[in-house]
């Protein structure tokens, strides 16, 4: 499957919020963190940062990813793919393309504890570097 990134706009917000709910709700419920208002606030913050990218193929929305370039690392947030597209290698291809946007940079991500996503990030070269009450902090060292 081919895909391209484009900056998300305000018109994309509700659809991406809905996607984030469909992807995250069961995981958040499992750890007692599901709160619709908090989910909306987190997506609003992601949009406010200006780094939210829509992932699409010929006008069809596949998902989104947020990249926030900081002084020490590029923080990855909000990688959400349509559930029926998960497990097919698309996520890995998206991460590869996202890393290529910031060559030579360290990347960091917070992964919800006990989420199957941790294995995905480990396969992408991320390692555990810290722990928070509900999240693992993972990083990928810079590569050339």
Image: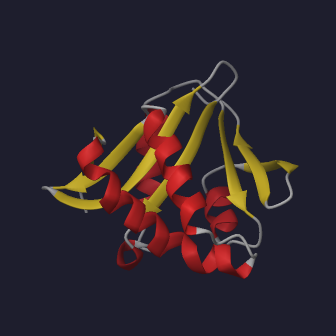
The mark tally for this picture is 0
**41 on left or right of 12:** right
Q: Is residue 54 above or below residue 141?
A: below
| Residue 6 picture quarter | top left
**Is the image coloured rainbow, by chain, by secondary structure, or in one colour?**
secondary structure
At x 36% / y 58%, what residue is drawn?
A: 16
Q: Is residue 92 above or below residue 85?
A: above
Name the spot of residue 4 as percent of width and height, x first: 26, 46
Question: Where the N terminus falls, by quadrant?
Answer: bottom left
Q: Can residue 70 be seen in this view?
A: yes
At x 70% / y 35%, what residue is drawn?
A: 141
Q: In this view, does 50 lie above or below 5?
A: above
The residue closer to the viewer here, 85 or 10, is 10
| Residue that lies at the very extreme toward the top in this rendered image | 71
| Residue that lies at the very extreme toward the front in this rendered image | 37
Q: Can residue 5 be seen in this view?
A: no
Name the spot of residue 11 as percent of width and height, x first: 23, 48
**104 on left or right of 134:** left
Question: Where the C terminus falls, by quadrant?
Answer: top right
Name the spot of residue 37 as percent of width and height, x first: 56, 62
| Residue that lies at the very extreme toward the left in this rendered image | 58
At x 75% / y 76%, what residue is drawn?
A: 32
**29 on left or right of 94:** right
Name the spot of residue 36 as percent of width and height, x first: 55, 68
Q: In this view, does 102 lie above or below 118?
A: above
């Amino acid at each position: 499957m081919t895909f391209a990134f484009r900056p998300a706009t305000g018109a994309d917000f509700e659809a991406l919020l809905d996607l984030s709910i469909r992807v995250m709700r069961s995981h958040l419920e499992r750890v007692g963190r599901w709160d619709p208002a908090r989910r909306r606030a987190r997506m609003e913050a992601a949009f406010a940062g200006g780094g939210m990218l829509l992932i699409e193929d010929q006008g069809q929305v596949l998902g989104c990813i947020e990249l926030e370039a900081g002084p020490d690392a590029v923080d990855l947030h909000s990688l959400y793919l349509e559930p029926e597209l998960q497990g097919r290698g698309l996520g890995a291809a998206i991460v590869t393309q996202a890393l290529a946007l910031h060559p030579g940079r360290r990347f960091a991500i917070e992964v919800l504890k006990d989420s199957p996503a941790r294995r995905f990030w480990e396969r992408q070269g991320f390692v555990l570097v810290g722990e928070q009450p509900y999240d693992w902090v993972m990083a990928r060292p810079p590569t050339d």
